[in-house]
Image: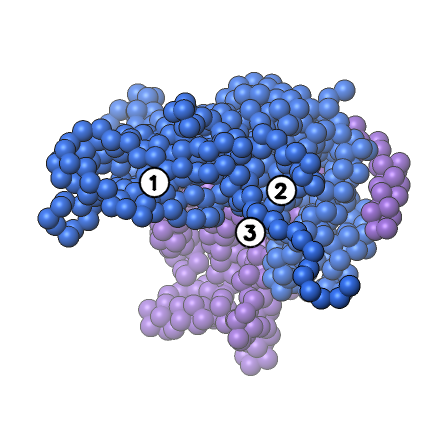
Chain colours: A purple, B blue
Amino acid sequence: MASSRLSGADGVVSATGAREIRHERWTIEPVRVGLVARVREFWRYRRILWFFAGRRIKERYESTTLGKFWLFARPLIPIVMSTVIFGRMLGIKSDGVPYFLFFLTGSSCWRLFDRSVIAATRSLDQSRGLIKKVYFPRLVAPIASTAPSFIEFGIMLTLTLLVGGYYYYHEGVIYLRLGFLALLAPVAAGLAILLALAVGFWTSVFQVRHKDVQLSIRYFLQFWQYATPVIYAHSSIPEKYRFLASLNPMTGVVELYKWSLLGVGEFPGRALVSSVAITLTILVTGAAYFNRAESASVDRL
Amino acid sequence: MDSLVVEGLGKCYSLVGESEQTVQRSLWQRLRSPFDGRANVEGDREFWALRDASFRVEPGTVLGVIGPNGAGKSTLLQILARVITPTTGRVVGEGRVVSLLELGAGFDPDLSARENILMNAAILGVTRAEAQRRIPEILAFAEVEQFVATPLKHYSSGMYLRLAFSVVINMNPRILLADEILAVGDAVFQERCQQKVAELAKEGLTVLFVSHDMDAILRICNRVMWLHKGSVRREGDPEEVVDDYQNAVWSQADIGSSERGRRSNRFAEILSVRLVSGTGKDLGGAPSSEDVFVKVRIRTRNSKLLLRCAMDLSAKGQLIFRATDEHVRELPEPGDYEALAKIPRNLLAELSYAVTISCTFKRANETKEYPLVVYNALSFIAYATQTPGAPSSGRLQRLGFIAPQLEWIVQREAGIGV
C-alpha cells in the first residue's frame, strides 16, 4: 500500500525532474577539481550552508542554563575587564572617546575575526562525523563555522549602539558617527570575515595533520591582537612603526571599523589597500590550498 | 548502458605513525634536508586498500560485495560515495548516488525529522520544494508521522533506521550504496526494505550491498562480487561466488594467521589445527553426512607432561559450545602428538564455524598449569550433502547454530479416548 503510493510519486518526479536528475553523468577521478569548478559546486550546495550554520549556533548556546544571558555576557566580560585594566589603571589613550566605547568598538571587529579563525580552524575536525560519511564540498565546513561569530558580532554592535546612547543621555556627547559613512562598518566586518576565512582555510587543513595548530592558534591570535590597534589607538603608534603596522592586514580593517563608527582617527587609506591586497592573496591561495589538500586530510580524519 | 563503470580503481594510504606526525618532526626533517623531497617518504609505508578494481554494473543490478575484512569493500563504497578520493583509476556513473553506510550518518540528532529530511535533501542536491513535497511519503514509509517535530536523539534506533532508509530511497536515487544496515532492524521492516529495493531495482536502481552475512547476500543480490586484498577476485552468479568464497576463506587452516592467543610455551607448541575426514584427508568444509575431525598437532619438549584439550566452536561470532576432553592425557616423552576431536555427523548446521583450540599442559609433579590457546585456529563451512525429503530444506530456510539430527518418536497415544 505504502509502497505503491511511493512508486506513483516516483513516477511523477521522474517525469518532471527527468531533465536534470535522470541523465546527469558524473565521474570520480584522482584528478583534482580546479578551484573555479569547486566554487561553482559550492554554490550549488549553498543550501546546506544554512543547516551547518544553524547547527554550529545551536551547539554554542544550547543547554546553557543562563541561555540568552551568555549571548551578552560572553563578549562583555573580557571587555569590562580590559577597560578596567587598560583604560583605568594604565590610562591608555583612546582618541578622546570613552575607553569603554573605544575598546568595545575595536574588539567587536577583532572578535569577529578572532572567533571566526578559531571556529574555522576546528571546522574539519568538528564536522568529521558528516565528512566521513556523506559528500558535500568541504569548503562548506569552514565557511559555515563562522556563523556563531556573526551572532556575537551583531550583539556587540547592538551593545555599541546602546553604550553610545548611554553617553549621549548622560554626557550629551554623541560619540557615534551618524552619517552615511557609518555604512562602511559592515564593509570592515566583511573584510574581517574574509580574512578570517583566508586564514581558516590554511589552518583547518593544518589542524587535521598537526593538532599543534589548535593548541597554538589562540596564542598566535592573542599576539596578533596586540599587534593590531584594538586596545590602543592607531594614533599612538610611533610614526616610524606605522608602515610596519600597515603590513598587518587587520590594522586597516579595525581602523576602518572604528573610523566609520566612531569617526576617530584618519581614514586608513594606505593600511586598507594593503589589507585588501593581503586578504585577497591569502584567501585565494588558501582556498586553492584547501581544495588541494582537503581530500588527503579527510583520509586522516 | 551501464549505470556504473569502474576502471582500475585504487586507493593508497600512506601509513605514518600518528605519534610521529607532529609539526616538530616534519619541520625538523625539512630543516635538515630542505631539498630532499624524500625526507618525509622515508618513514612512510604504503598500503593499498583498493588496487586496480574494475567492474561494470548494469541498471537494476543488486550487486553484493563480499570479502574478508580489509579486502577493500568499505573503501570501494567510500570512493563511490565520494567521501574519499581514489588514488588511481576512475568511476563513471549516472544519476544520483545515495548511501546508507552507517546508522544515522548525515543525520543531526538535535534536529527534528523534518529538518533532517531537508538537510539531507540539500546534501543530495534535491530542491527544497521537491523535498517538502516528499516529506509525507518519507514519514509514512518510515512510520514516524507523529514524530515529525521530535529531535532525532529521542528516536529509537529502529525509528532512526527506518527514517534513514526512507530518506535515501525517496530521493529518487539511481545508485544505492548500503552495508550491513540493510540487513538489520526488525524483520518486518527488513522485509519491506528488501521489497522496496527489489521494486526500485526493477525500475533501474542499482544497489551495491556490502555484507558479511552470506544469507542476506543470497537473499537480496542478483550478482555478487568477491573482493580480495583490494581487487576483484571473482564476480558473477551469487550462489557460485558465495560458495567459492566460503570454500576458499574457510578452508584456510593456517594458524599462523591467527594473531591472538599463545601457541607456544617452554613445554610445547601447537603446530597446526586442521579439519580432516575420517580417513585423515584435509577438508575445506564439513559434509553433514560424515564424521569429521579437528586435528591438533602438538610438539612437546619435555617428558612426563599431562595434557587436557578443549575446543570452542563458534558461528557468527557466538560461542556455541565448548567441548573439553574428559580425560587428562599423559604424554610420556617429548615428540609430536596429534589430538583429534570428533564432530559427529548430522550435528552442524549449514554455517561457517570457527574453532578455538586450547591445550593445557601440566608437569606430572606440579600443580601449575600452562595453557596454550589459538583463537580462531580454524574456520570451516558445514554443508548439507543430501537432505532427503526434509521439509523446506533450502539453504536459506535453515535457522539456528546447530542442526542435530534428533530421534523422533511418533506414535499413537496410549490409553486415552477412542
Identify the residue at horizontal 58%, vertical 27% (top origin). Answer: B243
Q: Is residue A153 visible?
A: no
Q: Are labels 2 and 1 assigned to the same chain? A: yes
Q: Are labels 1 and 3 assigned to the same chain? A: no
Q: Nearer the viewer, mark 2 or mark 3?
A: 2
Please state, as top left, top right, bottom left or bottom right, where the N terminus of chain B lies in the image.
top right
Identify the residue at horizontal 46%, vertical 38% (top origin). Answer: B344
Mark 2 and mark 1 lie on one chain; the one further toward the N terminus is 1
Identify the residue at horizontal 72%, vertical 42% (top origin). Answer: B194
Which amino acid type is marked by label 3?
Answer: Ser
Q: Residue B398 got which mark? A: 2
Q: Is B95 or B321 nearer to us in this picture?
A: B321
How would you rate the neighbour count of disc 3 (Cα within 10 Å): few for under 14, some for 14-19, many for 20 or more?
many
Identify the residue at horizontal 59%, vertical 36% (top origin). Answer: B214
CB under 8 Å between discs 2 and 1: no
Depicted B218 relative to depicted A155: above or below:
above
The picture quadrant where one finds residue B239 is top right
